[in-house]
Image: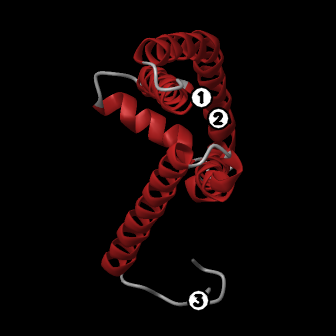
Amino acid sequence: MKWFNKNQVEDERIVHMKNKIYKEVYVLIMSICMVSTIVKSFMMEDWKSSLLELVIVVSGGLYFSVRSIFLGIYSDEVEVHDSRSKISLKTRNLLWSIGIVAFVALFIGIRNAILYSDGSWSKGLLNFFLISSVTLLMSAPIFVVGNLIIHKLANKASQKMSGKDPLDE
């Protein structure tokens, strides 16, 4: 971060290694928050106990996304990914969004089957299938279409910001 030392020259290797460490710390913090949220959701019925962890995960991802768009990095990342990979970034994001929705639907189904089945296997199984399928059918189209729209708008905004880059001139 260059908040205080603006004119200091640093070795690229050291900066690269620091960035690698920051990335590892970010992934570690996000993983701990997600595990904490999952454990709390099974142990407590009140979802408000894991609100801080959810805020940390969402705000971290949101900050990273917005920052990369306003720096013009997002469109460059899309270009590089699409030229190197067989699957475009748009398709990859679509597959990830379907996977996340399926995971959330299964998670909600299992959680509700465990917490609200009253000890009966048949009622628990019925709860699981009913809640999982309804969650999947309701949230999948919204999440997938939203993800595609966000990708399109983010790529467009990032290309616009990348065009204003003074280093390219």
Q: Secondary structure at mark 1?
A: helix
Q: Nearer the viewer, residue 56 or 63?
A: 56
Q: Secondary structure at mark 3?
A: loop
Q: Whole-Å distance between the Cαs marked 3 and 1? A: 36 Å
Amino acid marked by disc 2: Ala
Q: Position of residue 21 (x, y in %)?
A: 37, 71
Q: Answer with the quarter of the image where residue 1 lies.
A: bottom right
Residue lying furthest front: 119
Q: Position of residue 30 (x, y in %)?
A: 49, 57
Amino acid marked by disc 3: Asn
42 over 114 or under it: above or below = below
Q: Answer with the quarter of the image where residue 103 lies.
A: top left
Q: Is residue 105 visible?
A: yes
Q: Is residue 59 visible?
A: no
Around disc 1, counting alpha carbons within 10 Å, would you say few (fewer than 14), some (14 to 19), or many (20 or more)? some
- Determine which of the numbered discs, if any, sits on residue 154 in the image: 2
Q: Nearer the viewer, residue 115 or 164?
A: 115
Question: In the rendered view of the protein, which quadrant contains the C terminus?
Answer: bottom right
Q: Are marks 2 and 1 in contact (CB under 8 Å)?
A: yes
Judging by the rendered image, the residue that carries numbered circle 1 is 151
In the displayed structure, does residue 134 sit left or right of residue 161? Answer: left
Amino acid marked by disc 1: His
Q: Whole-Å distance between the Cαs marked 3 and 2? A: 32 Å
